[in-house]
């Protein structure tokens, strides 16, 4: 029996209650805004639900069947997303690492340069896209005018399918490279200087030091960067929305934007949900593959 | 033969002079220790020799080559870092063979030399391990092994034992001494620990504020310190320094030079006796019994703190009056500038 002067709760339960109370704000947010919608999407992906008619009918895997086997758009969209990711991820990582190598050691003005390259990351994506859309206009665009001064007749960047994809990739890289640069700078600065000095004394060239010492030690950071950049590239939306609207000729129509079109332009929420599920599986599979490859490499 | 010669070597970082003109000759096969308090420039000097730090002015010769502008890797030196600097993603074998690999030494030759060094350092069983799987002492040995494999003309050690615990430090100290005996290669060793300096060195270089205070064998430095700084830096516990007139109290036979300002006496050369007519008077303020020896802290009648060390069999009672005496031959005299002056001949 409980003693008269004993507290209402034992210490163990009191600590547990406190822990749950502290966790609850995040937990409630997570359930309402993340877990809830996720579960809802799983359900909606198996319905035919038109936002206009407000009627949801359970159709099983029909949406998935349509996407994967019936609708020819889907595969083109997936291909576009693949090209976007394949173009963006290596370019972004190579540029981020190059910048980080140049800016990881202190020199006069280093903070200025880091700020310059990081500033686009915190700039509004829409504003960024609008400015670039303006710069990349056909004949009147500043980019083409500058090219003209050296005798190059620039293409109409955003109106030709191949050039449009290249343009959105490059402008997206410039926007986001600062984030990966900062991650690489942090990783480079965490590598003790002694390693490099020891290698120098042993006769290693700069390239050998990079390839045999620095690059392997950056592996965990490279993995993280690769995963988040790949995920980010599959999720790209605002940039496409503003710069090309998926065009020309669906040349830049990527998965996230396609999902948006299906759900909020054509109001086919069931189909959009199924596409979102597919995207989720693709991104997760890619992440798992990357992690496994890196782990194998590190062994 | 001279293995290394430093001629008026200077180093300046921005507006700070770190090495202010060092002249030094190191013989082939010699074990030289740079010792001094933190910030004296000993590590910088070592790094200048290695080539990791530029030389602002002066000349550095390795053998008979002027190497001021020679790349670190081409100077024929190998360095053991304080942090060991073992590459964490490489096994012991790959760490030790790294230098040979980047110099494109054939795999078979590489293998042979790594195995040879591993055998010397008893690392055979650890070759497949990663640095994280090794103890501090083992890592230290791998770092030394990596240096040996390159077969350098000169070994440089930058405070190699400071990350080890006391017991291991003593052990590794003797291993390094044994290694030097075996290899007979010139070694330059930086430390702030004067016991390490005394036990390892053929020659000690005492540095302060970027200048050499004294160069000599451990015995020379201990028995004939050239100035007050060296006198107090070498020897543990450090030398007592008293006004020159105390000398005649300590030893009636003392011949105090006229230019002497102060007299130095090592704690182990002081005898503590009960109150008597002869000797420097004082009061015991603290006893530190350490087993082998006892440190007796005494305050002299003119309020000077004095430390005496004896074999520890007798502990003088706290607060008791004592007299201190010493043999005249054990007194060191220093002038106003702190430079050693010889005792007047009797």
Image (spheres, helix red, strand yellow):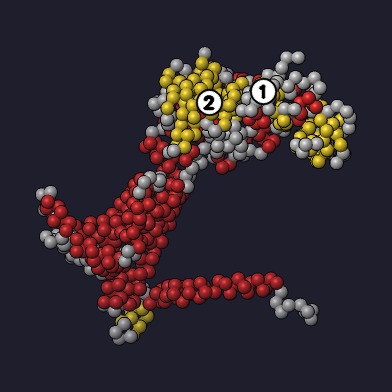
Label 2 sits on a secondary structure element that is strand
Q: Nearer the viewer, residue B207 or B178?
A: B207
- Say whether disc 2 or disc 1 marks the residue closer to the N-terminus: 2
Label 1 sits on a secondary structure element that is loop
- Whether residue B331 sits left or right of residue B200 in the image: it is right
List x then y, in percent, for residue A71.
26, 69
Q: Nearer the viewer, residue A71 or A186?
A: A186
- Whether residue B262 sits left or right of residue A153 in the image: it is right
Q: Are marks 2 and 1 on the same chain?
A: yes
On screen, residue A11 above or below A287: below
Quadrant housing residue A140: bottom left
Task: For mark 2, name the chain.
Answer: B
Task: For mark 1, name the chain.
Answer: B
- Looking at the image, which residue is at 73% across and 14% down? B345
Is residue A120 in sight in this rendering?
Answer: yes
CA gap, disc 2 and disc 1? 43 Å
- Whether residue B277 sits left or right of residue B177 in the image: it is right
- Looking at the image, which residue is at 30% across and 51% down? A91
List x then y, in percent, for residue B299.
79, 38
Would you call the spot at circle 2 few (<14 residues within 10 Å), some (14-19), or many (20 or more)?
A: many
List x then y, in percent, for residue A74.
27, 67
Q: Nearer the viewer, mark 2 or mark 1?
A: 1
Q: Nearer the viewer, residue B119 or B99?
A: B99
- Looking at the image, which residue is at 28% across and 74% down? A262
The numbered dot on residue B259 is 1
Location of mark 2 (residue)? B155
- Whether residue A184 sits left or right of residue B95 in the image: it is left
- Looking at the image, which residue is at 40% across and 53% down? A182
Is residue B190 in sight in this rendering?
Answer: no
């Amino acid at each position: 029996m409980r003693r008269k002067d004993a507290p209402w709760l034992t210490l163990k339960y009191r600590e547990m209650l406190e822990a749950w109370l502290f966790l609850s704000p995040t937990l409630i947010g997570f359930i309402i805004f993340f877990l809830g919608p996720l579960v809802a999407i799983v359900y909606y992906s198996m319905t035919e639900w038109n936002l206009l008619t407000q009627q949801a009918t359970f159709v099983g895997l029909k949406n998935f069947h349509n996407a994967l086997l019936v609708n020819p758009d889907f595969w083109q969209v997936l291909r576009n997303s693949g090209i976007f990711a394949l173009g963006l991820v290596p370019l972004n990582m190579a540029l981020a690492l190059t910048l980080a190598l140049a800016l990881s050691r202190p020199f006069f003005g280093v903070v200025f340069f880091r700020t310059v390259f990081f500033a686009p990351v915190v700039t509004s994506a829409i504003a960024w896209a609008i400015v670039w859309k303006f710069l990349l206009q056909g004949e009147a665009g500043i980019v083409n005018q500058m090219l003209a001064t050296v005798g190059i007749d620039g293409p109409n960047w955003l109106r030709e399918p191949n050039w449009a994809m290249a343009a959105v990739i490059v402008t997206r890289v410039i926007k986001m490279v600062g984030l990966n640069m900062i991650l690489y700078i942090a990783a480079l600065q965490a590598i003790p200087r002694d390693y490099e000095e020891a290698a120098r004394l042993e006769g290693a060239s700069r390239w050998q030091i990079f390839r045999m010492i620095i690059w392997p030690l950056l592996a965990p950071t490279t993995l993280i960067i690769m995963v988040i950049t790949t995920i980010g590239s599959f999720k790209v939306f605002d940039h496409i929305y503003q710069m090309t609207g998926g065009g020309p000729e669906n040349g830049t129509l990527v998965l996230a934007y396609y999902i948006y079109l299906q759900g909020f332009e054509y109001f086919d929420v069931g189909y959009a949900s199924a596409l979102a599920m597919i995207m989720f599986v693709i991104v997760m599979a890619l992440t798992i593959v990357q992690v496994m490859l890196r782990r194998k490499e590190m062994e | 033969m001279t293995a290394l010669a430093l001629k008026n070597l200077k180093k300046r970082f921005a507006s700070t002079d770190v090495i202010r003109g060092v002249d030094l000759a190191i013989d082939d096969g010699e074990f030289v220790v740079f010792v001094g308090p933190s910030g004296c420039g000993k590590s910088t000097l070592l790094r200048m020799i290695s080539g990791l730090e530029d030389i602002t002015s002066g000349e550095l010769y390795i053998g008979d080559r002027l190497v001021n502008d020679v790349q670190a890797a081409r100077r024929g030196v190998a360095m053991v870092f304080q942090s060991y600097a073992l590459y964490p993603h490489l096994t012991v074998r790959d760490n030790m063979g790294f230098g040979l690999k980047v110099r494109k030494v054939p795999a078979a030759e590489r293998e042979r030399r790594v195995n040879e060094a591993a055998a010397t350092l008893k690392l055979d069983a650890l070759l497949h391990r990663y640095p994280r799987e090794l103890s501090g002492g083992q890592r230290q040995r791998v770092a030394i092994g990596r240096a040996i494999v390159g077969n350098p003309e000169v070994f440089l050690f930058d405070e190699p034992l400071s990350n080890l615990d006391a017991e291991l430090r003593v052990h590794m100290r003797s291993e390094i001494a044994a290694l030097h005996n075996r290899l007979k290669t010139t070694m330059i060793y930086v430390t702030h620990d004067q016991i390490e300096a005394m036990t390892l060195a053929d020659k000690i270089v005492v540095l302060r504020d970027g200048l050499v205070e004294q160069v000599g064998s451990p015995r020379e430095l201990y028995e004939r310190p050239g100035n007050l700084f060296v006198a107090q830096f070498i020897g543990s516990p450090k030398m007592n320094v008293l006004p020159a007139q105390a000398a005649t109290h300590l030893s009636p036979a003392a011949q105090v030079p006229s230019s002497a300002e102060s007299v130095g006496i090592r704690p182990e050369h002081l005898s503590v006796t009960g109150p008597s007519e002869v000797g420097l008077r004082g009061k015991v303020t603290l006893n530190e019994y350490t087993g082998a020896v006892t440190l007796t802290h005494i305050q002299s009648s003119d309020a000077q703190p004095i430390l005496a060390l004896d074999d520890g069999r007798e502990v003088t009672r706290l607060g008791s009056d004592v007299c201190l005496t010493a043999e005249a031959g054990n007194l060191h005299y220093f002038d106003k500038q702190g430079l050693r002056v010889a005792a007047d001949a009797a």
